[in-house]
Amino acid sequence: MSVSPPVVIVMVAALLLMGQEMTGLQGRPLELDVVSSGETATLVVAGSAPARQRVRYTLTVEGQSYTRHAGSVTLDNERQTVSRVRVPAKSGWTATLFVESEAAPPYRITRKSEH
């Protein structure tokens, strides 16, 4: 069975995109998720790593008040929750997660309340 060149190009492009996605996930061991429930939003710092590595993080939440969580954790391939912060869902908060790891350049993730 023969496959036409355009089909091969599309297949290769799809594989490359999947590889980029995996690399992106591996390059960012921690993520910042927002889980809203009624009038409360829970900010969750969680993640994993393909190989055991030490990660330092600082989560700051600014709005009606100021909160700062900082720590360091050793991650492996099991997903871990390392910090949770509850805030009023509509209070005008901004959360910033700063992460430094052994295996990737430092990065920031910022999330804001909907209002």
Image (spheres, helix red, strand yellow):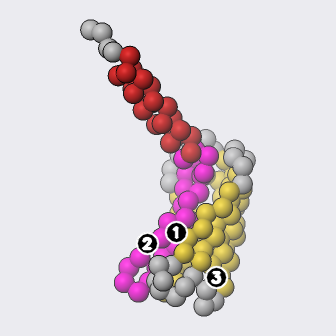
Which numbered marker is on residue 62?
A: 3
Q: Nearer the viewer, mark 2 or mark 3?
A: 3
| Percent coordinates x, y for residue 13 in the rendering | 45, 30
Q: Give residue 92's quadrant in the image.
A: bottom right
Alpha carbons under labels 1 and 2: distance apart: 8 Å
Query: Is residue 98 shown left or right of residue 6?
Result: right
Depicted 66 relative to depicted 108: above or below = below
- Dots 2 and 3: beta carbons under 8 Å? no
In the displayed structure, 40 sits above or below 52; it is: below
Q: Where does label 2 land, which residue?
A: 35
Q: Please give left or right for residue 62 compared with residue 7 in the image.
A: right
Q: Secondary structure at mark 1?
A: strand
- Determine the CA span between mark 2 and mark 3: 17 Å
Compared across the picture, whether 39 is left or right of 105 comes to: left
**Location of residue 94 by image quarter:** bottom right
Marks 1,2: beta carbons within 8 A: yes
Q: Which residues are magenta?
A: 25-49
Residue position for label 1: 44
Q: Main secondary structure of the magenta part?
A: strand
Q: Residue at x 50, y 54 (%)?
A: 79
Residue 76 visible in the displayed image? no
Q: Residue at x 42, y 23 (%)?
A: 9
Amino acid at circle 2: Val
